[in-house]
Image (cartoon, grey):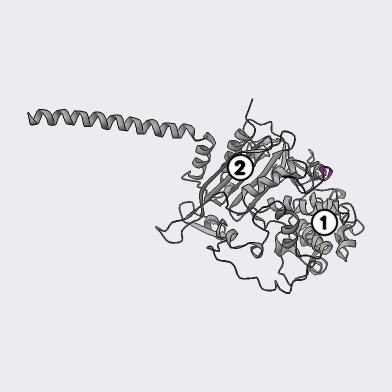
Amino acid sequence: MYATAFTQLRKWFRRGALLGACMLASMSGALQAAEPPVTRTLQAIVSTPDTPVASLSALAIRDGQVVYEGHFGLRQIPQTEGAPGLPADHATLYRVASVSKLVTTIGLMRLVEAGQLDLDADLSQYLGYALRNPHFAQTPITARMLLTHTSSLRDGGGYFMPLGTSLQTALQGGNPAAWASPQADADRAPGRYFAYCNLNFVVLGTLIERITAKRFDVYMQEAVLRPLGIAGGFTPETLNQADISHLAVLYRKGQDGKFQPKGPWVAQTDNFQGQMPAPRAGLQDYVPGTNASGFGPQGGLRISVAGLGRIMQLLMNQGSLDGLRLLRPASVAAMLRPQWRAQSDPAQGDTLGGLFQSWALGAQVFVDASGPSRGDRLASRGGIAAVGHLGFAYGLHAGFIFDPVKRNGVVYALGGDGDDPALHRGRYSSFPLWEERVLDALWSVADPAP
């Protein structure tokens, strides 16, 4: 009798276990179904075994409204095995490299609106010394040329100088062959030839300091970030403890320029481990207007993707956000209007392997050019025209790209390369393969195919 009862109880238990397993499977399936496909895609990109990404924060805007935000991986990888890392989240700040230039441009346009700067005037009158390419000594260099990378300046002599070094001394007393395009032909004259150059924005940052008598990073806090309620800043000195605690360390797998995909993640920059950094030497004695390279106009902005999303919405709304008007519609239109376009003749400019096809004021214009590992196409289906800026440094890849007509856009920051991007080129663009995949996934949300 007891054996019979036991057998019956075992049957009931098995039925209950089976029913429970079915319920759990059903719940798991429901959760997966509720999870947006873009989330699964982005998580898979971060977790790809051969080409992992240290961290990823991403955002999509449709018709002016945020419709997706996701965060993956670790903003800070543990230094000892078994210790917990810190995940990327809504508050994570990334050093977004050259995306900074677009935000710098907003600060500059505020001075244009105030009548303190003429985009087409000889900048020598503002700087207090002659700014010239010695090979074209009679041709003035203007702010418009710097913003459109047609100034004839170049980065051969570097674009970061110690705080005690004068930009005037570096440009006038240095080797002109290092920072000035030669007189190869007439098309190399200022205003004629496109060549992407970080030094352009060092000059613009120094120009902002000369006009405002304020350190560049301080001015940008006051003129752009703080009015919009955006956390972050252009230098560690402008960050507070909460910012530092949420700062993403940027990584690569490998060091000294050599990638080791199977090796550990190696910190490249912003590895403060939650501690406020000590002030840099020379900071207290710095005189605004002498050399802004150390304050990041060319690439130092630390900001979250949510913060960049607010700036994108500002531009989508023609300079206004949450009742605050930061720029006039005419200024935003001027920023986004194409100024240079690549021609069939390569002498018109350096497209950086087909990635740069058109340029506006401090912003790239994406024209949907495409080819195997070449072009600026933003999604596999093609057909998306947009403006914005890209960033690439220290293992980071970042993008701020939007369609000002449809008011759709994407923002992303990948915080570390698991392998050499040059070995993993995109299928239909100049982007690395993992960045191409992130763009494709985000645009499927921001601008779904009809």
Residue closest to the eye, 384 or 376: 384
Residue 237 is situated, as x and y percent measured from the top left of the image, at: 65, 65
Quarter of the figure that contains the N terminus = top left
Q: Which residue is mark 1?
A: 182
> For the residue labelled by badge 2, is the local secondary structure a helix, a strand or a loop?
strand
Mark 1 and mark 2 in contact? Answer it, CB < 8 Å.
Answer: no
Q: Position of residue 382 (x, y in %)?
A: 66, 31
Outermost residue, front side: 323
Residue at the extreme left: 1
Q: In the image, what residue occupies the spot 27% across and 32% down?
A: 17
Find residue 178 and report its horizontal and vertical position in percent: 76, 61
Is 348 placed left or right of 354 in the picture? right
Q: Mark 1: which secondary structure?
A: loop
- Pick the residue in front: 218 or 143: 218
In this rendering, the answer to whether 205 lies above or below 39 is below
Pick the quarter of the image with the C terminus.
top right
| Residue that mark 2 sits on | 59
* Amino acid tagged 2: Leu
55 relative to 308 in the view: left or right: left
